[in-house]
Image (cartoon, rainbow, N blue to C red):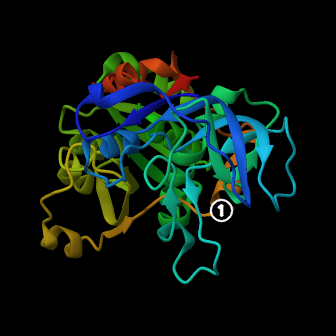
Amino acid sequence: MQAIRVHAPGPAEVLKWEETPTPEPSAGEVLVRLKAAAVNHLDIWMRLGSVFAPMPIVPGCEGAGIVERLGSGVTGYQKGDEVVVTPWIFPDRPYADPPNLSVRIFGVARDGCYAEYVVAPAHALLRKPAKLGFEEAASVPLTTTTVYRMAITRGNLQPGESVLVVGATGGIGVAAIQLANAMGARVFATTRDTRKGTRLYDLGADAVIDSGSDFSAEVRRLTGDHGVDLVLETVGKATWVRSIASLRRGGRIAFCGSTSGAEVHVNLQEIYRKEITAFGSYGGTPEEIRRVFRLVEEGLIRPVIDTVMPLKDAALAHERMERAEHFGKIILAP
């Protein structure tokens, strides 16, 4: 089969288009012929070496395709079924920790979805919703489930509250705006690209703010100097101080990423004097994945595809994401 492989960490050029043997499913596994694979920042972090992975490895933590062959002991699927490969491989044993903290990830712990075929444990698959195309289905699991856990499970977003989505035009931000709007929240969104910003209103944003400005001052102006109830933060170093300043007294900040850097300045007096609560959030659980797909099937969240590119152009896709040129998800098609 044809696949993208990384042999050593480095720039986008280390993504090599190669011929490699088609994998065989072991007991409990399924061979999936992929029709689409989503590009995520996690793939870039792995490629750069900031997330450890055994190399050579096929990147790609989520995809969608058709069941080609079953390993022994697999029930519930048959050849020809249309499925989604979810990012997280949960442990078989009873969960000693929250299941999202005990996972292995496709494209990091084992070969992923930048290929014509991938082998996946049967429990890492979901049936593809009939109303979604393969590209749309591949774009849902990682970002939307991560947002669900960050905003709902951890952030406890309630109808009628106000939420600020920082870095709103990537996959996480696009899903966050839709989910918060579906919850009945008042949604503020930041972006440094004014051309993209106009599209955020269509997704449910009530106000779009230039992230290159002091967006916290604008948030406070729009909320009558009150601040928002919840900030969803994915950018990190470049925006953290302004995100904290955007919160009301007793507000919450939930964060799941650090695309601009993980080392941030924290003013402890500001945190405790305003009784701010901060939540780290990581991935999602099997139940949260199922809830997300129900929301998608009900039409409350719709996948937003930036572009679909041939699999062999994975390096160009990574460069597009690194330059923040995308709006929504970038998809690779074998």
In the displayed structure image, the side of residue 176 where residue 12 appears, left or right: left
In the displayed structure image, the side of residue 20 where residue 289 appears, left or right: right
Residue occupying image coordinates x 85% and y 39%? 79
- Position of the N terminus, as image quadrant, is top right
Q: Looking at the image, can residue 192 be seen?
A: no
Quadrant of the rendered image containing residue 230:
bottom left
Total number of numbered discs in the rendering: 1
- Position of the C terminus, as image quadrant, is top right
From this view, report whether residue 271 is shown above or below residue 188. Answer: below
From this view, report whether residue 280 is shown above or below residue 166. Answer: below
Residue occupying image coordinates x 42% and y 43%? 57
In the displayed structure image, the side of residue 238 where residue 153 appears, left or right: right
- Mark 1 element type: helix
Asked whether 78 or 147 is in front, the reply is 78
- Crowdedness of circle 1 by 10 Å Cα count: few (<14), some, many (20+)? some
Residue occupying image coordinates x 77% and y 53%? 71
Callout 1 amino acid: Pro
Where residue 127 appears, x then y in whole percent? Answer: 78, 45
Q: Which residue is mark 1?
A: 286
Q: Looking at the image, can residue 303 be seen?
A: yes
Where residue 298 appears, x then y in whole percent? Answer: 77, 41
In the displayed structure image, the side of residue 184 where residue 48 appears, left or right: left
Where residue 196 appears, x then y in whole percent? Answer: 39, 20
